[in-house]
Amino acid sequence: MGPTFAPSGPGSLNEISEKKQRTPFAFEKEHNSAWYKLTAAEDGNLTFDIIPVKFDDDYDFLIFKARSKNFRDSFLQLRSKPIRSCISKNKKELKGLTGLKIRSKKEFINEGPGDAYVKALEVKKGETFYLVLDNVHEKGAGHSINFSYEEIITVSGQVTNEKLQPIKTDITITNSKGDTVEKTITDEEGYYKIEALLKKNYKYSLNFFNDETFFNSKELTTKTPTDSLQNIRTVLPELKKGGKYNIKTINFYGGSPLYLPAALPSINSLYKIMKKNAGLKILIVGHTNGCSGIGAIDSQKLSVERAKAIQSSLIKRSIAADRISIAGRGCSEMLYPEGGAEWQQSLNRRVEIKVLEK
């Protein structure tokens, strides 16, 4: 949510001070404050990031739990203490970020140099909390808050080649923006285990890379039971002339040649394979999700533009243009019928790779 601009000053009442809350973990006084009422939508570990628009703004925050319907009266009678507090000095290397994280150990951070995050809140559905933010500086540029529920989830499995021999593999978990969340490497038997801090009900990509094979990516969603994220068996196909590879994680916005941010890890893996194998030449083939909306001719053009977008990305990374050919198949080779579920339509908007020379 946001950006939100805190009003100038503390408002009609200055409700917060170390003296009033009888704790050293409260603001010395309110400067420019904003209050939020939070109601838990489900059980879980509530986390958030407070993101200043201007990195120099210094946000402190307190969280109170509403233990009765008369929270305001109880609060004004000085009977409420914060259950979380972070009033440390702005961390410029974090661009002013502060908030709650699962892996933070402390519930309270007092004034001066200190951690930017405090421990997540374990909440129950329907519980109510009050969050008060205070920007120490006047004329702040506002802030946004990203709320989420997080869990530490175990992701494990084994990676082999097509002969079922274990291979050493780099493994990353990336979010929908293409950012790496966790990474590891398999052991000599091809096994791996990651204790990943993931947001509930989010989609991630589980990416596998080995220099001598073609890479693989799988969708990982925290909506599924956690036991389905363990003992994952992955086979990396041989990188060979004539080989065809459907990259399920290089997908595009509907009706557009722009690839989704989640495609970045797979594009990076394709680049690393091209760089490692100097004699490798490939054909990138673009595809669309149906023809009825844009017409067969336009669909063909769009599929070529999608292939060209991946080609351009590789060329910008110094891969020679004569090693990358492109083609488009329009809507002629859809994986799923037009008008299917959204995830099926997304997988239709793809590119595939064919190895021309190895």
Image: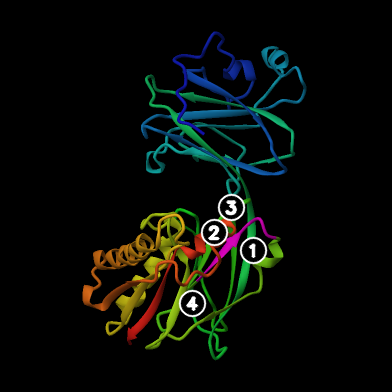
Mark 1 vs 4, N-terminal side: 1
Task: Name the residue that disc number 4 marks.
Answer: 169
Residue 220 in the figure: left or right of residue 7:
right
Amino acid type, label 1: Thr
Mark 3 or 4: in front is 3
Which of 302 and 33 lies nearest the eye of the viewer? 302
**What is the three-letter code of the residue carrying label 3?**
Tyr
- Name the residue beneath numbered marker 2: 204
**Distance (Cα) linking label 2 and label 3:** 7 Å
Rounded to the nearest angstrom, the CA distance separating label 1 from label 4 is 18 Å
In the picture, measured across the screen, residue 85 lies left or right of residue 40, that is left
Q: Amino acid at mark 4?
A: Thr
Residue 84 at least partly seen:
yes
Instruction: First in sequence, mark 3 or 4: give its number.
Output: 4
- The percent position of residue 88, horizontal first and vertical second, equals 48, 33
Is disc 2 in contact with disc 3, using a CB cutoff of under 8 Å? yes
Q: Secondary structure at mark 3?
A: loop
In this view, the residue farthest toward the right is: 68
In the picture of the structure, the residue carrying the numbered disc 3 is: 202
What separation in Å lies between label 1 and label 2 (alpha carbons)?
14 Å
Disc 4 or disc 2, which is closer to the eye?
Answer: 2
Instruction: Name, please, the residue furthest toward the top.
Output: 12
Look at the image and give the residue range highlighted in magenta: 217-224
Residue 15 versus residue 335: which sits nearer the camera? Answer: 335
Image point (25%, 72%), residue name: 319
CA distance for labels 1 and 3: 15 Å
| Residue 222 among magenta residues | yes
Q: Is residue 214 visible?
A: no
Any mark on residue 154, and which? 1
Residue at the (36%, 83%) spot, across then down: 355
